[in-house]
Image (cartoon, rainbow, N blue to C red):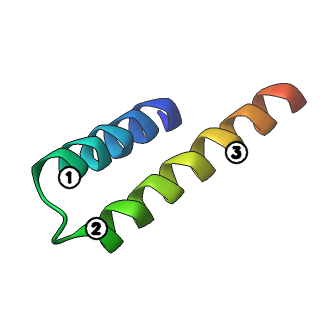
């Protein structure tokens, strides 16, 4: 589930980066959120 969300956020960021820079701040926030989600998933995976 977390991987799916992270991939969707990264794809949205990539599409936003390619299409226009008007929502640059929002897109970069999405990228940061996606990275955090991936890192949390990796950390939880190592614990489990």
Q: Is the C-beta separation of discs 2 and 3 under 8 Å?
A: no
Residue 27: image location, x then y, percent: 32, 61
Instruction: Look at the picture and state if 9 lies above or below 47.
Output: below
Q: Is the C-beta separation of discs 1 and 3 under 8 Å?
A: no
The mark nearer the N terminus, 2 or 1, is: 1
Residue 42: image location, x then y, percent: 73, 32
State the separation of the CA atoms marked 1 and 3. Answer: 24 Å
> As rendered, which of 19 and 40 lies closer to the eye?
19
Left/right placement of residue 23 relative to residue 10 reads left
What residue sits right under mark 1 in the picture? 16
> Residue drawn at (57%, 47%), measured in percent from left and top?
35
Q: Looking at the figure, which quarter contains the C terminus?
A: top right
Residue 4: image location, x then y, percent: 40, 31
What residue sits right under mark 3 in the picture? 40
What residue sits right under mark 2 in the picture? 24
Q: Secondary structure at mark 2?
A: helix
Q: Is the C-beta separation of discs 2 and 1 under 8 Å?
A: yes
């Amino acid at each position: 589930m977390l991987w799916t969300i992270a991939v969707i956020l990264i794809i949205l960021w990539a599409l936003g980066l390619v299409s226009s820079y008007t929502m640059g701040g929002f897109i970069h926030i999405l990228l940061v959120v996606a990275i955090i989600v991936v890192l949390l998933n990796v950390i939880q995976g190592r614990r489990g």
